Image: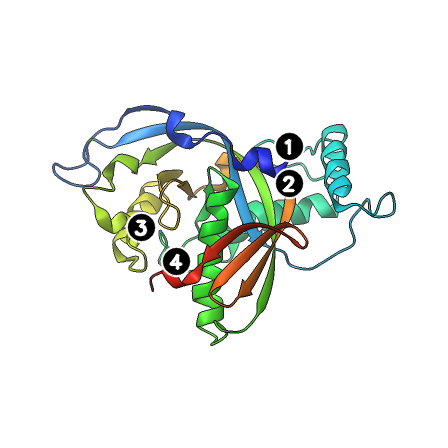
Amino acid sequence: MGICRAAHGAGLSGAHTKPLMSFRPNSLFADLALADLHQDLARNIVTLGEGQDLFDDLTSNPAEWSLALQIEGEVNRPRNRSRIPVIGSPFEEAQWFSVIVWPFKYWHSSRFSDGTYGVWYGSESVETTVYESAYHWYRTLLTDAGFERTAAIAERDVYWVACRAALLDFRSKTAQFPDLLSPSDYVFCQSIGNRIHQEGHPGLITHSVRRPAGENVAIFNPDVLSNPRRTDQLTYRLEGDRIVVELQSGTPWMTLGVSTWGP
């Protein structure tokens, strides 16, 4: 499955919904719905190191490396597709840990976490993960370090991860509760995350702040995630007041203007 096809996949709007019991009148949780989600989510993470491609001795064409990786994945399907992974090699174990387990082991503050528990984030498309991750790369790493006007490069890995869960659906609540989509103030969202964490819900669906057409999923229980599959690598290049995203090295795919981003 190539990244271009996956990037234009269907959104989460088709998930089956059913009424959820109201917790208290006139609150965010009143008349909330559940989204019964059974689909892949895109996960965009930092590449920890640049290693040798498994198939670069067969061809010098990076596109053919990606194709060979897909074929190898179909022929040698990973066994860790169930709730409890069965690891067949150190590589599979490292992949499972970095793609699924990492945020539940190393907690940090985020939109729906105050840093006292872990939350895993995924999106309905690769484009949405690009907008989200590029924003945080620029604002929380480069800007905080004073490098926002310095040429910088970041390598990212893109994975698809299976999600099977009944998720709290906040998509219809964003107009009534605009703090759900606050660009930089996470206090309201973290209070929601604390409740979801304490009550044991597996996660939630909401609209993307950085890409209004996109949707994000926040997962509080790793047991509902499985089958991570890497599709490709992206390169982010900060060039002046824009971030150029390359799908293949040297070939621009998306361009994001950082001057339009708020704090």
Residue 116, label in figure:
4
Q: Which mark is residue 231?
A: 2
Instruction: Say which quadrant the N terminus sits in.
Output: top right
Identify the amino acid type marked 2: Thr
Please name whichever residue, 180 or 63, is drawn nearer the observer in this view of the structure.
Answer: 63
Q: Residue lying farthest right? A: 57
In the image, is residue 149 above or below residue 53? below
| Amino acid of disc 1 | Met
Question: Type of residue at label 4?
Answer: Thr
Looking at the rendered image, the quarter that the C terminus falls into is bottom left
Q: Which residue is mark 1?
A: 1
Give the mark nearest the N terminus, 1 or 4: 1
**Mark 2 / mark 3, whichever is N-terminal:** 3
Secondary-structure class at tag 3:
helix
Q: At numbered mark 4, what does the secondary structure look like: helix, strand or loop? A: loop
Mark 2 or mark 3, whichever is nearer to me: 2
Residue 225, percent across and down? 52, 37
Q: Please name which of the two marks, 1 or 4, marks the residue nearer to the observer.
A: 1
> Quarter of the image holding residue 24?
top left
The alpha-carbon separation of the residues under discs 3 and 1 comes to 36 Å
Q: Name the residue that disc number 3 marks.
A: 194
- Figure quadrant of residue 74: top right
Label 2: few (<14), some (14–19) or many (≥20) C-alpha neighbours in 10 Å: some
Q: Please, is residue 89 above or below residue 237 in the view?
A: above
The residue mark sitting in front, 3 or 1, is 1
Instruction: Compute the Cα span from label 4 to label 2.
Output: 31 Å
Precedes in sequence: disc 4 or disc 2: 4
Q: Establish if 101 lies above or below 166.
A: below
Res 18 seen here: yes
Is residue 125 or residue 61 the one in the foreground?
Answer: 61
